[in-house]
Image: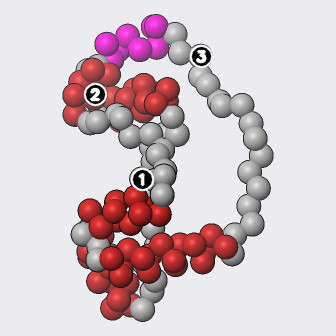
Amino acid sequence: MNQAYAELSREMGIPLVVTFDVHYPTMEDSEMQAVLHAVHRGKASVDDAMREWNYDVPLTLPESESELLDRLRKTGLTVRQATQAILATAEIAGMCDVTLPKAEKLRYPIQNEDLEPWM
């Protein structure tokens, strides 16, 4: 897909930017993601949902600029495309001034009987 986005970016004259697909911030949240997928997909159990999808996808950030570039290159982008996307993203980030309030994680107190239909 990234190659198609890069071509569209070139054709439209719109800078390509870097994004990341994150379903949850920490591994502790993966169980709830599995429950949500089980409900959404009408699975008989959470285990059924977990067999269909890899739930080991928490937010992870590259440890270096070269790791970020390598990740983008593995998606099919050229070094030039990946570098331009990183620079465009940094430019947009530089225009942002957002402060998010810190808050406790919202947790629904899950009871065993809540999960019974999917177990």
Label disc, if present, on residue 50 of the rendered structure:
2
Q: CA distance from mark 1 to mark 2?
A: 18 Å
Mark pair 3, 1: CA separation: 27 Å
Provide the secondary structure element on which disc 1 rests.
loop
Tell which tag, 3 or 1, sits nearer the viewer. 1
Precedes in sequence: disc 2 or disc 3: 2
* Magenta residue check for 116: yes
Q: Of the residues tagged 2 and 3, which is closer to the observer?
A: 2
Q: Quadrant of the N terminus?
A: bottom left
* Above/below status of 9 relative to 104: below
Q: CA distance from mark 2 to mark 3?
A: 21 Å
> Of callouts 3 and 1, which one flags the residue occurring earlier in the amino acid sequence?
1
Residue under pointer 3? 109
Query: In which quarter of the view is residue 73 placed?
Result: bottom left
Q: x, y (%) of residue 14?
A: 45, 86
**Left or right of 30 on screen, residue 52:** left
Q: Which residue is mark 1?
A: 21
